Image: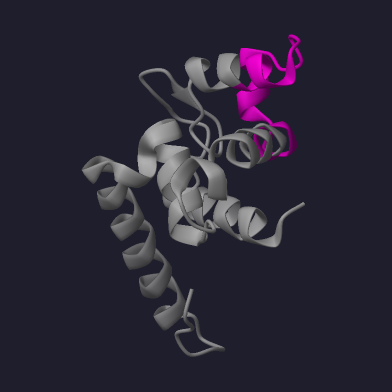
Amino acid sequence: MNVLIAKSILLIFLAETTEGTDYRNDGDSLGPLQITRIFVDDVNRILGKQWYSYENRIDYKKSTEMATVYLTYHCTRDKIGHEPDLKDYCMTFKGGPHGVWKQSALNYWDRIVVKYYKLSENHPTRKAVRI
């Protein structure tokens, strides 16, 4: 697995998980990564078969697999015009194939950064680190 994608998924998990309610259902989003049905459908389309079900969204391993497929397909140098970084992967996850150009996805990235630094600064054994 691409290391940046793996790190991005951890950051997304951090942003989507609050106070142990990682399986909440806010509208159509479900599971630790808050994956939508459309996201699952797109991953199955990319794979060319019905590999994942909507119920797989609550499984961390399956959610991670789906996110990896989605980001590997939609967030590439050819599609976004430069080598993807953590920000690009997180924004694509939130905003879809054109997420790197959406203000709402940029706001999501800002939320990830704030949450990450807030948690790392409060960690008793380490100083804040850069993403």
Q: Nearer the viewer, residue 38 or 31?
A: 38
Q: Residue 79 in magenta?
A: no
* 68 lies above or below 96: below
The percent coordinates of residue 19 (x first, y second) are: 44, 50
Q: Residue at horizontal 48%, vertical 33%?
A: 34
Residue 18 seen in render: no
Residue at 58% over, 14% down: 41
When the figure is inspected, residue 32 is found, relative to residue 121, above or below; the finding is above
The prevailing secondary structure element of the residues shown in magenta is helix
Q: From the top left corner, tell me how far across and down residue 33 is, in percent.
A: 53, 38
What is the basis of the colouring in this image? one colour
In this rendering, is residue 25 above or below 69? above
Q: Is residue 38 above or below residue 102?
A: above
Left or right: 25 with respect to 61?
left
Q: Position of residue 10 (x, y in %)?
A: 58, 55
Seen at 43% across and 51% down, the residue is 15
Residue 67 quadrant: top right
Give the number of marks. 0
Q: Nearer the viewer, residue 55 or 96?
A: 96
Q: Position of residue 89 (x, y in %)?
A: 50, 50
Q: Is residue 46 magenta?
A: yes
In the image, taking residue 58 as reference, residue 100 lies left or right, namely: left
- Please report the residue visible at 25 percent of the width from the left and 41 percent of the height from the top: 104
Q: Depth check: 125 or 14 in front?
A: 14
Q: Is residue 36 left or right of residue 49?
A: left
Q: Residue furthest top?
A: 50
Q: Is residue 39 visible?
A: yes
Q: Which residues are magenta?
A: 43-64
